[in-house]
Amino acid sequence: MQKELTFQFKARYFTLGEVTNNTKHIWFVLHGYGQLAEYFVRKFDVVQSSETFVIAPEGLSRFYLQDVTTRNQTGDTKVGATWMTKENRLADIDNYLHYLTEIYQKEVPENFAGNVTLLGFSQGAATVSRWAADNQIKFDRLILWAGVFPTDMDFDKMGGILQHKEVLEVYGINDPFLTDTRLKEMTQLNQRLGLNPKLISFEGQHELNAEVLKKISEGDY
């Protein structure tokens, strides 16, 4: 018989910069499968400034990227994190939604008058979409990078939430995961939401792109 309990949980996250009276922009950046926030956040050096504060939460489950045999043979003990798997997924989703909102409440001043950007990369795109759909936080812009909206969202609710938000979808034209079928699905999901997002593509694969990030942060798209 499966049972569940609720207990206090300690989790980490990483930041670039700090919130001051000069802060005009706060970015939440959610990593992809198998990444760690400590390294992921460094890719946003081009975004961080005296006016921009960057927050990188981390998936609540961590694991060795290589199996036991490979680790023993090569000494490769790199660790990654994931937001969820198919196992007990609803509990994982509920947990990370609470975690993300707790970070928001801790780091974003109650009277903050600037702009809040939510960015999700790869698996983080589905995660950040669910967080936005949870409708517990205020934000101004949603960026899905190398990922799409999850198909199990409440599309009517999410469409209403995003009606007056800026939505960007970014991908590398050589991304092996974003096949023609996947791109078609992206278009169909946008239509279900009643969205006409800004589509940004770049020469690259399944990765972030510093030049594109900088242009987005400077309002060049």
Image (cartoon, rainbow, N blue to C red):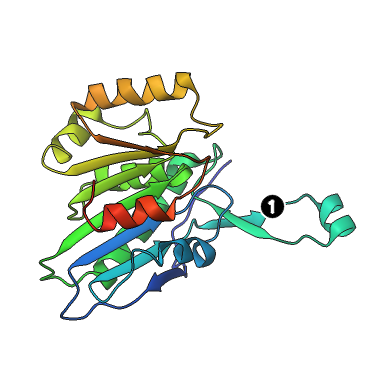
Amino acid type at image mark 1: Leu
Query: Camera-side residue: 4 or 67?
Result: 67
| Residue name at image x 39 percent, y 71 percent | 15
Q: Could you tell me which secondary element the residue under label 1 belongs to?
A: loop
> Which residue is located at x 27 percent, y 71 percent?
107
Residue 59 placement (x, y as % from top left): 49, 56
Q: Is residue 217 above or below residue 151?
A: below
Q: Is residue 98 visible in this depiction of the protein?
A: no
The residue positioned 56% from the left and 43% from the top of the image is 2
Q: Which residue is mark 1?
A: 65
Task: Residue lying at the far bottom in this picture: please name it.
Answer: 20
68 vs 127, left or right, is: right
Crowding at mark 1 (Cα within 10 Å: few <14, some 14-19, many 20+):
some
The answer to whether residue 191 is visible is: yes
Q: Is residue 193 above or below residue 5?
A: above
Quarter assignment of residue 176:
top right
Q: At x 44% / y 50%, what residue is drawn?
A: 209
Where, by quadrant of the figure, is residue 117 drawn? Answer: bottom left
As drawn, is 91 to the left or to the right of 97? right
